[in-house]
Amino acid sequence: MPEKVPSYLLLQKPTTKLRHYIQAPIHKHADVDGQFRRKPSQFRSFISSSPGAEFPPEKDRYALYINLGCPWAHRTNLVRSLKGLDSIIQLILCDFALTRDGWLFTGKHGSAPKDPLYGFTSLSQLYRKADPEYEGRFLVPALWDKKRETIVSNESSEIIRMFYTEFDALVPEELRESNRPGGGFYPENLRPQIDEMNEWVYNTVNNGVYKTGFASTQEAYEANLMPLFENLDRLEKHLGEEGHAPYLFGEFITEADVRLYTTLIRFDVAYYNIFMCNLKMIRHDYPRLSRWLRNLYWDGGKTLRGEAWRDTVSFWTVSCFPFFV
Ligand SMILES: N[C@@H](CCC(=O)N[C@@H](CS)C(=O)NCC(=O)O)C(=O)O
């Protein structure tokens, strides 16, 4: 690793074409010091199978709003499929281009022409229906409750956990957490290790690519670029250690694989160029990470419902997406 970024990586001014997209306030992500600081998601309820829960698991009750470009939304879409929830939780796609009015339903790029539940043209209308006073950003993913007509959660890390466990009474036996080999996506015995990895991978890799790409000063860019690559190196080393192959925690896929996958599948095609995360490429410079990624993309099908690893990826969308956020 170089100690300082080479001069050819000096943060460049956006091209005229790009400037067109990033001038609206919605495209300003960095604070005045040039750093991007992600705000906490604001809808944080939980679907729960406990008796008397406010949001119980029920077929056809919930809808998941996403677009195909977003890695956070991708996590939820991937787990929805891996858990066999496709026929239980409705999936609604927005267009992947972030406009001055936020995410839209346009009928283009796989998006519904209008929101199928209410005929809305933008996701912001759904947020306002849930809470007319809402002042945050209109984020995907958003998990909607059709009965209570509100957003249950717009935090991907929590939505995937609800999907692992809370619908198990509604899915075939072999897809229930207790029957999955290795104890499921978030097995008791690995929780401390998974949580520990989630923490640093989130800060430096999942969110690290955004902090690098949205940085608006050279200083902020370098301050995030270096930790990103140090931690990709750390992941590469991790995969070489005993008990850490073919998946991050051994023989069975866990949440840690899900959370890393949706960032790394975008890395070479999108973040490398558009977010200027370009000290190294996964496919050229990280042989173990590259093998891990290809194994999931191509051969995930050997695991239960594993074709979801490939089917939930739209490379075309992914390669354009960061231009539009
Ligand atoms: N913490 C959220 C982050 C979701 C998020 O940032 N989504 C982005 C797309 S990648 C979004 O909807 N951005 C719209 C905006 O910022 O206006 C999660 O993990 O669910």
Image (spheres, rainbow, N blue to C red):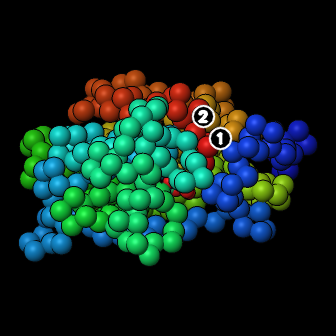
Q: Amino acid at mark 2?
A: Cys
Q: Position of residue 77 (x, y in %)?
A: 35, 43
Q: Position of residue 172 (x, y in %)?
A: 10, 41
* Secondary structure of the residue carrying numbered label 1: helix
**Farthest residue, direction top:** 298
Q: Position of residue 34 (x, y in %)?
A: 77, 63
Q: Which residue is mark 2?
A: 320
Who's the residue at 8% across and 72% down the image?
51
Is the residue under label 1 in contact with that under label 2 (CB below 8 Å)?
yes
Who's the residue at 37% across and 59% down the image?
126
Would you place residue 205 above or below residue 246 in this image?
Answer: below
Q: Is residue 45 left or right of residue 199?
A: left
Label 2 Cα crowd, 10 Å radius (few <14 / some 14-19 / many 20+):
some
Based on the displayed image, in which of its 4 quarters is residue 116 positioned? top left
Residue 302 visible in the displayed image: yes
**Front residue of this view, candidates 160 and 317:** 317
Q: Amino acid at mark 1?
A: Phe
Residue 176 visible in the displayed image: no
Q: Which residue is mark 1?
A: 323
